[in-house]
Amino acid sequence: MSDSPTKLDRQADVNEHSLLLDIEREVMGSDYGATSFTTVDEANRIAQMLDLRQGVKLLDIGSGTGWPGLFLASTTHCHVTLIDIPVSGLRAASRRATEDGMSEDCLIVGGTGQSLPFRGDLFNAICHCDVLC
């Protein structure tokens, strides 16, 4: 992975700005610097539909700054693996996982959903939010 900032990296950096986090909290109910339009209510429905709970291994494709994967892991106690391309988004997700005390229950990987670097039977559930748009 290159350390040169891409358009996606710059977007992740912008999304961590405090004013934008305030707006995100007001509109979506979260403050992950999200590039997804998934609301907290929708994330809770995803958790319910995927039957997320302790012992479940969730893969969040296109995770960006960790929304909603880190939120899902924190509320359901599942293990989450985040995968995405922008390095700055992954760095933000790593900081958030550390701040939320979730480093043990979270793996962060640089890569794409098109060519996953995992065995096919490693995960019980997969989510992606606004990745295919």
Image (spheres, rainbow, N blue to C red):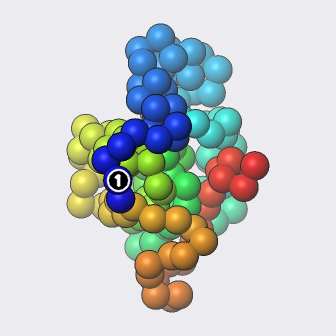
Q: Residue at x 46, y 87 (%)?
A: 119
Position of 62 relative to 64 (above/below): below
The x, y position of residue 127, in whole percent, is 61, 61
Residue 38 vs residue 13: left or right?
right
Q: Left or right of 124: which side holds 86?
A: left
Taking the spot 47% from the left edge, 11% from the top edge, the residue there is 19
Depth check, front residue: 17 or 105 = 17
Q: Quadrant of residue 79?
A: bottom left
Secondary element at image label 1: loop
**Rendered position, 67 above or below 61:** above
Q: Looking at numbered disc 1 in the image, what kind of residue is underneath it?
A: Ser
> Hey, which residue is sitting farthest top in the picture?
19
Is 109 placed left or right of 111 in the picture? left
The residue lying toward the viewer, choosing from 94 and 8, is 8
State the residue at coordinates (28%, 51%): 102
Residue 54 percent coordinates (x, y): 41, 67
Q: Nearer the viewer, residue 74 or 119?
A: 119
Task: Give whichever of 111, 80 is nearer the camera.
Answer: 111
Q: Residue at x 56, y 15 (%)?
A: 23
Q: Can residue 52 be seen in this view?
A: no
Q: Mark 1 points at which residue?
A: 2
